[in-house]
Image: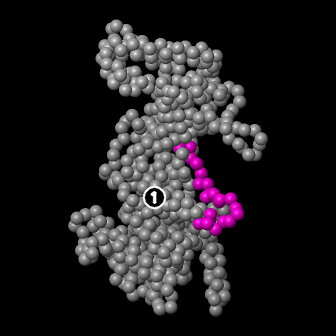
Amino acid sequence: MTGGSSLFSAAPETNLEDLFPELDHLESKLDQMKSILQPESKLNLDEKIKLSESFGRNNLKASLSTEDEIKQELTDLAKHLEVLVNYISEKFQPLRERLALCVSYGKMEFDLLKYYFKKDQIVVTQSANGLSSANDPPIAVKVKTTQMVVIDPQSTSTLLRLFKIHGEGYEWNGIGYSQRSVTIECHEFEGAKDMSSLPFLHLTSEMKDLLTTRGKLYTTFSGTHFFSYDGARVMVDRVGWNDYQSALSEAINLASATTRRKVTRQSDPRPQDVGQRTDGENVQHGSKGLGIPRTRASNEEIPQIEKEYLHFLPANVYGFDLENKCWISMYIEKLGPVSFDEGAWDHLVLDSKVKTLIKGLVEVTRKQNDSSKALIHDVIRGKGGGLVCVLYGPPGTGKTLTAEAVAEILRRPLYIAGATELTTNPSELEKTLKQILNLATAWDAVVLIDEADVFLEQRSLNELQRNTLVSAVLRLLEYHRGVLFLTTNRVRAFDYAFMSRISIAIKYPELDHASRFAIWSKFFALAGYEVKDSSDSIAGLNSFTRGNVEELASKPFNGRTIKNLVRTAQALALASNSPLTLEHINIVVESQEKFLDEFAGMKI
């Protein structure tokens, strides 16, 4: 009846003190029993038996058969219950009055918490100062059990106590909505404390309305979505998060087991603590790495959660930070639409025919993955179907920018994998690259493997590890169905087998004068400065003359260097609290030229 116990037990496990929080419930049950014992009660025999059995008197129907026997059973139950209620009420009357007095003044004592918060009540968490905030949003929890815990702080000789509420809420688990275990706690405090400053309170109707509104917002993030979070681009993906956490746990367990086998005459090592959230989940914010995604519920097939559970939904969702390459927890109220650079494609200085070719191939590849009218496929189903585009040429000619611009015009996420993420260990490389490509497929993302030379080089008889490396990459490219860009500066060293895996290879030549002029002009425009026609001989306050830019374009800088020069000159102008001028540009250009001359001399 209370805490899993009944009134009828040969060895009761419930302490009398534990029954005090249930006193209101017991009094209600007693009133209910007295009412059905009245002559005017209309409950039938089965209903009366069911009521008796709710007190732990099982199998009554087998032992009691007549109306009079059942009535006598209920009468006896009522008498026993009344004795218990009166005894508890009398014994704990001072405690009851003390609790009522505290509540009337809006105060609470630590020892009274276990009597104030009861099973099946709904509480709402607060921040440390009693006020919810964007950094510590409230959550609603249905109380299942409460617990007083004694902890040893180790730093002092004084034992401290915690009051814990173990409860439940609801959340999106990647496939549907399910219950989640939640544990919230309050540290011991002295004297009477304002209830408004407690870390949790009973849920009010006003707060329920607010949490219900937030819960409706939460449901819009169920599934897989591309969003902006605090300025960073992220993928909301609970399944990916689940798989990453599973892989992390396996790695920790494996590492722990391996270490234990190696350690002798020492205490067993403990895996590194990954942190404990208040909802009982192990969370490591900013956790590097990927997980292999399992089946996801498509965004068109998201099941609906019943309205009465909306206020139990949490304030955060889980996903992947595309820039920092880590899985993170995100507050839903900080998520927003991605702001795409509409001019990114126009900023790309590349032959117009080549740009049209790239854009067309990418769009067709994307559409065929969503359409029954697909392009021809391999004899073996599942092989091919993707776009593998190799961009080759010297540094700073626009290779990386091409992939970035494609992602912008298609409004799709871009996953950039560099040499630091892709190890040269063949087995680790294959595992990591497979994870990246699987996630990219699930997210409908464009993938860029920057500086992929080491994975593309021709195999030889004397380098077994690199041969294995190249073979692993070849296998993965053969089955990828998304859009993949590979950039390299050493196309002559390509392994011949890559030729059949490449959809298209595009050469990026050294920038000529016209290309450099266009790049200088575009970066000046991005900085808020225009390039005037040649008829203007003097630069204005927010402009440069064509002659100025022609002179700058005559210098053999690549596109990346030009961008850095404009940014550095901007910083110089800001430091002097003045607009950007040709003088600022010339200062950084001369410095760069001097460095390049000295660097060339050192190489000779």
Which image quarter is the C terminus in? bottom right
Looking at the image, which residue is at 62% across and 71% down? 583
Name the one closer to the observer, 339 or 53: 53
Looking at the image, which residue is at 31% across and 51% down? 300
Name the one closer to the observer, 22 or 462: 22
Residue 272 part of the magenta-drawn span: yes
Q: Name the quadrant containing residue 602.
A: bottom right
Farthest residue, direction right: 157
Residue 598 part of the magenta-drawn span: no
| Residue 577 image point, x, y percent | 65, 60
| Residue 548 image point, x, y percent | 54, 75
Q: In this rendering, would 360 be left or right of 106?
A: left
- Coloring scheme used: one colour
Q: Is residue 407 visible?
A: no
Amino acid beneath label 1: Asp
In the rendered structure, which segment of residues is drawn in magenta?
258-279
Q: Is residue 226 visible?
A: yes
The residue singled out by tag 1 in the image is 243
Looking at the image, which residue is at 52% across and 23% down? 22
